[in-house]
Image (cartoon, rainbow, N blue to C red):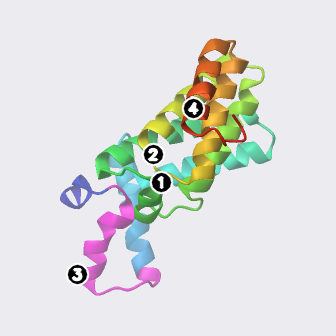
C-alpha cells in the first residue's frame, strides 16, 4: 500500500491498480477498497496532499460560506489553495483545465477559484490580512495560469488591482491598470 501511495496524488489513483488486479469495476466492493485506502492514507500520512482532502476542504468552505461565515470560509479556502499549488507542483500542472481534467472534484478549480477570489474580497472589506491574501492569490493565479480564459484573467486582474487600491497601495494599482491598458486599450474594466 505504501508503494501504491508513494507517487499518487489521490487515494482513488492509488486504488486503481488494486481494483484492476482484482477485476473490480465500479461496484460497492470497489468503493470499499477506495474508502479503506483513503482512511489508511489519512492515518499514515496526514500531511501528504491528496485530491480528496482538498475537495473536503473546499466543501467545508462552502458550508461556512452558506452560513455567512465569510472569514472562516476564506481561511479554509486559503488552506485549500495551498493544496492546489502543491498538487500542481507535484503533477507538473500549468493550467486550470489540466487541473480539472486530472483532479475531478465536486467543484471545478475553474469555478471554485472565482468563489475564493470573491470570499477573500468580502473578508478583506474589514480585514487587511485578507486583502493581502487576495493580492497574493491573484498574483500567484495569474503567474501560474497565464493562458486561462480571457474573462477570468481580466476579472482576476481587476480583483488584483482593486485589492491594491483597497489596501491603500494606489500607485501599484494605477501601474497595473496602466500596463494592462497599454497592452489592450479596449479593455473595458481598465
Mark 3, other Cα within 10 Å: few <14 / some 14–19 / many ≥20: few
The image quarter in which residue 127 lies: top right
Mark before the other along the chain sequence, 1 or 3: 3
Report the Cα–Cα distance between label 1 and label 2: 7 Å
Q: Quadrant of the N terminus?
A: bottom left
Asked if residue 24 lies in the magenta stretch, the reply is yes
The residue tagged 1 is 96
The residue tagged 4 is 182
Report the Cα–Cα distance between label 1 and label 3: 32 Å
The image quarter in which residue 99 lies: bottom left
The residue tagged 3 is 21
Report the Cα–Cα distance between label 2 and label 4: 21 Å
Q: Over which residues does the magenta segment extend?
A: 9-29
Residue 149, given in percent of the width and then of the height, sits at 55, 54
Mark before the other along the chain sequence, 3 or 2: 3
Residue 144, given in percent of the width and then of the height, sits at 42, 41
- In the displayed structure, 99 sits above or below 162; it is below
Q: Quadrant of the C terminus?
A: top right
Q: Is residue 169 visible?
A: no
Q: Nearer the viewer, residue 50 or 94?
A: 94
The image quarter in which residue 5 lies: bottom left
Amino acid at each position: 500500500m505504501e508503494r501504491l501511495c508513494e507517487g499518487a496524488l489521490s487515494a482513488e489513483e492509488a486504488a486503481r491498480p488494486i481494483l484492476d488486479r482484482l477485476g473490480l469495476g465500479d461496484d460497492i466492493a470497489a468503493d470499499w477498497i477506495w474508502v479503506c485506502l483513503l482512511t489508511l492514507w489519512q492515518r499514515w500520512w496526514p500531511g501528504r496532499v491528496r485530491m480528496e482532502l482538498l475537495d473536503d476542504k473546499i466543501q467545508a468552505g462552502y458550508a461556512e460560506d452558506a452560513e455567512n461565515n465569510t472569514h472562516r470560509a476564506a481561511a479554509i479556502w486559503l488552506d485549500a489553495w495551498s493544496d492546489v499549488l502543491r498538487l500542481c507542483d507535484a503533477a507538473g500542472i500549468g493550467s486550470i483545465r489540466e487541473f480539472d481534467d486530472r483532479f475531478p472534484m465536486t467543484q471545478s478549480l475553474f469555478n471554485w477559484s472565482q468563489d475564493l477570489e470573491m470570499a477573500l474580497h468580502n473578508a478583506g472589506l474589514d480585514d487587511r490580512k485578507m486583502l493581502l491574501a487576495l493580492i497574493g492569490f491573484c498574483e500567484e493565479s495569474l503567474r501560474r495560469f497565464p493562458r486561462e480564459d480571457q474573462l477570468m484573467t481580466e476579472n482576476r486582474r481587476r480583483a488584483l488591482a482593486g485589492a491594491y487600491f483597497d489596501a491603500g497601495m494606489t500607485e501599484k494599482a494605477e501601474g497595473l491598470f496602466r500596463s494592462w491598458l497599454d497592452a489592450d486599450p479596449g479593455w473595458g474594466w481598465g
